Image (tube, rainbow, N blue to C red):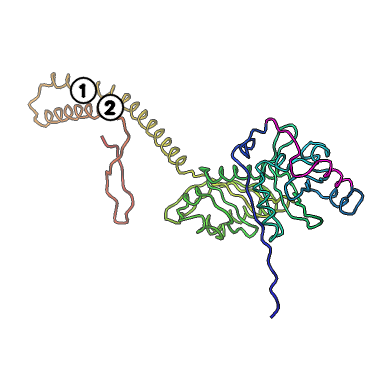
Amino acid sequence: MAEQKKMSRTMRIDLIPDIPAQADGSDHSRVVIKSGAGSEPSELAHESERLINTPYHELLQGIYDAALITDLNGYISDLNVRAVEFFQWTEKELIGAFVGDVISGIGTDLIEMLVSNLEKERHSLIQAYCVRKDESVFPAEIAVNRFRMGEGNLCFFVRDVTLRRQAEEMLRTEHNAIQNAANGIAIADLAANLEYVNPAFVKMLGYDSPESMVGMDVRQVIGECTATEDMIDQVLVKGLNWSQEIVVTKNSGGILDLDLFAACNYNSDGDKVGIVFSFTDLSDKKRAESAMRKAEQQRVMLETLGAACHHLGQPATVLTANIDIIKLRLDTDDDLVNELVDSCVDALDNLGKKLRKLNSVNEYRTTSYLKKDSAGENESLILEI
């Protein structure tokens, strides 16, 4: 049986504190580079000079990351140009210094642990803050491995991850903003299949969770119609923005009015990778507009009704006065005539009461006057007073 190849594992160490300047519990406001008791600076400098103009030294200087070579006690014996650029100390100042003076959080205990771990594994990875000569700090990702030449050395490859950390923080902030946005946000791929939906969109359409919507065709969500195909063509083919009010059937039942805005999604190379959607629930807006229209209709009808009462009130008053005079001067025994006069008086009195009621109406409501016919049509409505 063939012998199985041993798989290498990487030990990861996180030395990043909440407050970078206090990473190791000390105050970095006065960092002093000094050599330790492990090696004499002159000996380490001599060792560094001995390696100049060797392939090893050319390789070290050509490495993109800052490189610090230390003995097994953590004292720097060699470095490359990038280390001088990163830390702002001169090469002579760094040679013989303890690596923990420039990488915050590293102490003798951690050096011993690294040496022990690197006896078995190829790499250790450290997340820490590094300290420059001007007392500023920067986040770094540090790969540590062990050289076997001579008595052995540790090599710290330091990469400044400030820009990456800033980008991650920005992405985290943007993600939190999208997750907590009141508007529905969704992202679809080139086939118009949903890749991401925020909680607001899930709640808006009545689904159980974002996972239940991921993978769905956007046509299935907002409806298969000419407008949807036009939107996909405008955004994905022509690269234009698209906006329109749409009516969507909710998964939980019911109709929802939405304002949809769609734009093309691009990757870092400028290639089209899908569509970004923004959905605004128009339900409250529609209800407010409906209430405003109803209020305006009420106002117009009440003003019309008031005007009608005013115009009808004056001739009704004249008729009432004239009928009263006619009744006083009428001298006849004809019962029919007397009955007709009394009927006119009663009608005018009733008309006056109706006009007063109409004039005091403050809400325009109707009631059925004639019932619907056998076909269910032709229902007549009159003002309810």
Q: Residue furthest left?
A: 333
**Closer to us: 227 or 278:** 278
x, y (%) of residue 256?
A: 46, 49
Image quadrant occupied by the C terminus: top left
Which element is circle 2 on? loop
x, y (%) of residue 128?
A: 66, 44
> Which residue is at a point 51% across and 55% down the rendered structure image?
210
In three-dimensional space, the C-alpha distance between marks 2 and 1, rounded to whole angstroms, equals: 21 Å
From the viewer's perspective, is residue 254 above or below residue 173? below
Residue linked to disc 2: 360
Q: Earlier in the sequence, mark 2 or mark 1?
A: 1
The 10 Å Cα crowd at callout 1, few under 14, some 14 to 19, many 20 or more, is: some
x, y (%) of residue 109?
A: 64, 47
Magenta span of residues: 29-49
Checking the image for residue 320, the label placed there is 1
x, y (%) of residue 46?
A: 87, 44
For the residue marked with disc 2, what is the amino acid?
A: Ser
Q: Give the number of callouts.
A: 2
For the residue marked with disc 1, what is the amino acid?
A: Thr
Location of residue 105 by image quarter: top right
**Closer to us: 195 or 355:** 195
Q: Mark 1 and mark 2 in contact (Cβ < 8 Å)?
A: no
As for residue 124 lying within the magenta part, the answer is no
Location of residue 23 by image quarter: top right
**Closer to us: 87 or 313:** 87
> Which residue is at a point 76% across and 40% down the rendered structure image?
97
